[in-house]
Image: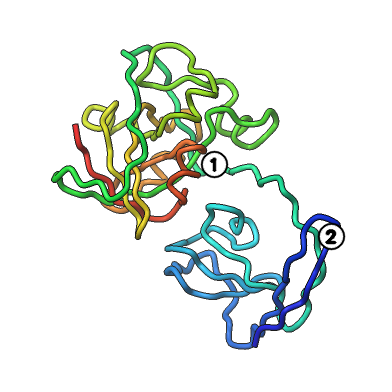
Amino acid sequence: MVFMVASCSSFICFSVQAVSCSNLSEWNSATAYNGGTQVKQSGKAYKANWWSQGHSPANYSGQWQEWTLLGSCDGTAASSTKSSSSKPVSSSSKSSVKSSIASSKASSSASGNDCGAAWYRANLTNYESYPAPGSDECVIYNGCTWSGYFYGISGKQPESWVMANNIAAVHLKDWSWLGNKTLNLRQGSKRITVKAYDACSDSDCDGCCTANLAGDGYLIDLEKYTMQRFGSGSGIVEFQVCN
C-alpha cells in the first residue's frame, strides 16, 4: 500500500510516498536487477529503471541514474523541500590518454536512427569533461587534468563546445575501429547519434575501463551533457558503427 503525504515550501509543493515494504527484498550488491524490479534499502523502497548490478539504490537514485526512490517504508515518509539544483553526475569511468588528432564536428541527436550496420552491446557509463574541483571525477579519475581535451581532437575545447556536441568515449583497445566514428546508440526507446571523440585508458583509473566492459565486451562512456540528452548513463546499451 502506498500513502501520499503532502509537503510544501514557499516555492514548491509535492507529495512524498510511504510504501509498504513487507514484500520487498533487501538490495544485494551481488544480485543483477532487471528494469521494474523493486527492492528496499535503509528503510526506503526503490524501483530499477533498467538493468543494474552493484550500484546501491541509495547512491544511484538521482536524475538519469539506475534507481527511482518510491518512498520511505511503512508510512515513515517525512516532509522535505525539493531543491531546484541538480545533483552532480558521478562517473564510473574516465576517458584519458590525450593526444592531438584532426578535429571534426559531432553529429547531432537523432531519433530512431539506423544506418543498416550490425548492432553491438556495450556497458554504458558516463563522465564529465569539466568536473567540479575536488569532486571524485576530478580527483580519482583525473578529470580536471584533462578538462576540455579529447583523445581524437587537437587542442582544448571550451565547455560550450562540449555542451553542444554529442560525445562518447570508447575503450582504448577499440580505438582503431571506433575512434572518431559516428555511432548510433539505443537503449529501450532512447536513441541518440554520437561521435567517439574520446578514449578510456586503464592507466588513468586503476583498470576501470576494462572492469567496465560488458555486453559483447565493449564500453560506451558518454560525456555528461550527452548523457542528459540521451536520458541514461548506465546499464547495457546497443551501438551501431555508421562511418
Front residue (pair 181, 26)? 181
Q: Please give the name of the residue rendered at 39% of the width and 21% of the height, measured from the top-left corner.
A: 151
- Give the numbered dot on residue 91: 1
Measuring 37% from the left and 12% from the top, which residue is drawn there? Answer: 100
What is the crowding at mark 2: few (fewer than 14 residues within 10 Å), some, or many (at least 20)? few
Label 2: element kind: loop
The residue tagged 2 is: 9
For the N terminus, give its image quadrant.
Answer: bottom right
User: Dividing the picture into quarters, in which one does residue 209 lie?
Assistant: top left
Q: Report helix, strand or loop for mark 1.
A: loop
Picture quadrant of residue 68: bottom right
Residue 85 on image: x %, y %: 71, 45
Q: Is residue 212 above or below residue 35?
A: above
Front: mark 2 or 1: 2
Give x and y (percent) for residue 170: 35, 35
Q: In the drawing, does residue 223 fall left or right of residue 236?
A: right
Amino acid at dot 1: Ser
The 10 Å Cα crowd at callout 1, few under 14, some 14 to 19, many 20 or more, is many
Residue that appears at 58% across and 27% down: 130
Q: Tell me the kind of residue under disc 2.
A: Ser
Q: On the picture, is 29 further left or further right than 33?
A: right
